[in-house]
Image (tube, rainbow, N blue to C red):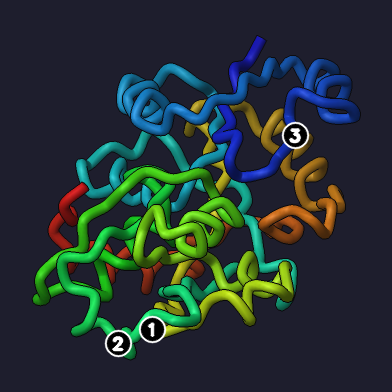
Amino acid sequence: MLSFVVDRNLGLPACDEPWTTLLAAAGITATESTDLAGIDRALAHHQPDIAYVPAPSLHRLLRSGDDHYRGLAIATSKFTGEPRQTSVLVVRRDDPATGLDNLAGAQCGYINTSCTSSYFAPAILFTGQPPMHFVAVPPWQGQIDAVVAGRVRATMVLEDVWKTTPENASTTRIVARYDNCRPPVVLVSESLDKASCATLLEALITWAPDWKGVYGAFKPFYYADVHGFFHDLDQVTECSR
């Protein structure tokens, strides 16, 4: 059986029907995890045949000279249908901050150190400025709730997430944005046979995600979709956790 590791935070229910039956018929066994450091180690050791991970995980592999995996599919924004999203820096509605200068050294909620929107987006925005201090919080709406509750002063979260709950506009404010985020990608081993790749790609691009989820439907992966974002990542030294 082929192994498929999935970042559970990304919303692909690979261990639920109809995915379990579909994947089993293709000879694929899926496992879900929120241990992104563990997933990245597994990728570095070429353990899974297939993975669904944040785009920076692919960048990390390519930057190290590891071309064992290639992109098969990429998620999209559910609002635009394009493989590009915006991450917004939000604070409480009553916070006096008006921009990045007011938040240097502040506590910033993030999901994990592979997260495009909550970790790498602020790293890119704060390049050349005093960094924020990162505090792990629950993902997506949980990040915004942590800001409203005062657990952290700010967070960067996908604007798609922020817009999904209208109340966020009355409890928080957007003070900065990064417009070049790229959604997560499905990676496959370069040695994976063409028939398996074709079966999996067909299943991915015909799947209709629940609107309540974070991401929209999948599209076939093209390196051009991530090239600009990977260039931005190349300019950044890893921000403090």
Q: Residue 13's mark? A: 3
135 in relation to 92, above or below = above
Give left or right: position of 236 versus 171: left
Which residue sits furthest top? 1
Crowd around label 2: few <14 · some 14–19 · many ≥20 (10 Å):
some
Q: Residue 99's mark? A: 2
Report the label total: 3
Determine which quarter of the picture holds residue 219. bottom right
**In this figure, which residue is indicated by the disc labeled 1?**
176
Crowd around label 1: few <14 · some 14–19 · many ≥20 (10 Å):
some
How much space separates mark 3 and mark 1, taking CA atoms? 32 Å
188 in relation to 11, above or below = above
Asked whether 213 or 229 is in front, the reply is 213
- Sequence-first disc among 2 and 3: 3
Q: Are marks 2 and 1 in contact (CB under 8 Å)?
A: yes
**What kind of residue is marked 2?**
Gly
**What kind of residue is marked 3?**
Pro
Asked whether 181 or 202 is in front, the reply is 181
